[in-house]
Image (cartoon, helix red, strand yellow):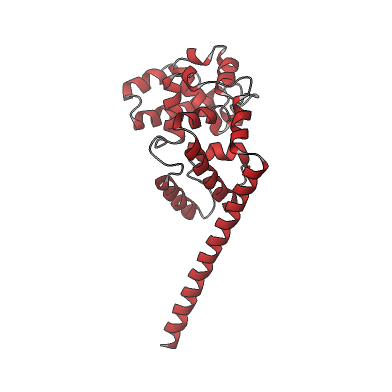
């Protein structure tokens, strides 16, 4: 009986410590978010992105490109409130299975928050701060505005930080002129620009592009036949 009571006390103590640790991390994350906002307001950060020379309006990007980005990065983008509980739950499960941090479950809004204020360091405090910043973004900007800011604040390799600059640099054309092959290729690059930039490896770029096509098919943006038509244009990945 004493052993059972001791066991219950130990379990209760462990859960208490976990809860307190969670509150501590959440508090530190909130402080990181508040400090970031105080150093430079969200309005100022957004303005600095929009002032970029190569800034590309969402209306100047083909629907295929926008759908490709949403499919591969955050397919519930237009339905969530800044974070995606389903994606987070899946990521936590994968992290537990791998016994290390392998997946974050970040939405496009969270990725934009990180790009605007934070580093890529994989620590829980930063992730919590990112969540608070994502809520701030969703409260003050529309989904289209967030998506537009996102594609103008991610790295495409070769010194390109906007979708428009990447289109002009890689394909020699204005972004609105990109075809389906170019849109789906470009959408896959930011995942790992050092690997997937076509100037680094056309084969790896097209392997990633094929993943984008499969995601678009799964999300209903492309039929199987349409995805295969684009895939048939691939040169290295055949």
Q: Residue visible at 46% across and 50% down?
A: 94
Image position of 83 (left or right of 196): left
Q: Residue visible at 62% across and 46% down?
A: 121
Which residue is the extreme one toward the right?
39
Residue 46 appearing in the image: yes
Residue 207 appearing in the image: no
Q: Is 77 drawn above or below residue 209 in the view shown?
A: below
Q: Position of residue 97 (x, y in %)?
A: 46, 54
Q: Where is residue 212 in the image (x, y as percent from the top left)?
A: 44, 29
Which residue is the extreme one toward the bottom?
1
Q: Residue visible at 55% across and 43% down?
A: 133
Image position of 151 (left or right of 36): left
**Depth check: 9 or 207 in front?**
9
Q: Position of residue 138 (x, y in %)?
A: 48, 39
Q: Residue visible at 57% across and 12% down?
A: 172
Image position of 192 (left or right of 225): right
- How many callouts does the rendering have? 0
Q: Is 174 drawn above or below residue 120 in the view shown?
A: above
Q: Quadrant of residue 171?
A: top right
Image position of 14 (left or right of 63): right
Q: Position of residue 225 (x, y in %)?
A: 32, 21
Q: Is 150 drawn above or below residue 185 in the view shown?
A: below
Q: In which quarter of the image is the N terminus?
A: bottom left
**Depth check: 126 or 220 in front?**
126
**Depth check: 170 or 57 in front?**
57
Q: In which quarter of the image is the C terminus?
A: top left
């Amino acid at each position: 009986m004493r052993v059972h009571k001791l066991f219950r006390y130990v379990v209760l103590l462990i859960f208490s410590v976990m809860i307190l640790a969670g509150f501590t991390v959440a508090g530190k994350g909130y402080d990181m978010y508040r400090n970031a906002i105080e150093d430079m307001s969200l309005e100022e950060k957004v303005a600095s992105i929009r002032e970029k020379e190569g800034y590309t309006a969402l209306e100047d990007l083909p629907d295929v490109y926008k759908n490709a980005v949403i499919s591969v990065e955050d397919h519930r983008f237009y339905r969530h409130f800044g974070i995606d509980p389903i994606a987070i739950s899946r990521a936590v499960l994968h992290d537990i299975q791998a016994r290390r941090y392998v997946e974050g479950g970040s939405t496009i809004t969270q990725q934009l928050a990180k790009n605007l204020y934070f580093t890529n360091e994989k620590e829980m405090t930063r992730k919590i701060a990112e969540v608070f910043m994502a809520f701030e973004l969703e409260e003050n900007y529309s989904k289209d505005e967030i998506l537009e800011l996102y594609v103008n604040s991610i790295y495409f390799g070769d010194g390109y930080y906007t979708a428009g600059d990447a289109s002009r640099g890689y394909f020699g054309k204005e972004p609105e002129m990109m075809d389906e092959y170019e849109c789906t290729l470009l959408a896959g690059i930011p995942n790992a620009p050092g690997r997937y930039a076509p100037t680094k490896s056309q084969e790896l770029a097209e392997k990633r592009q094929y993943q984008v096509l499969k995601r678009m098919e799964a999300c209903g943006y492309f039929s199987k036949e349409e995805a295969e038509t684009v895939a048939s244009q691939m040169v290295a990945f055949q």
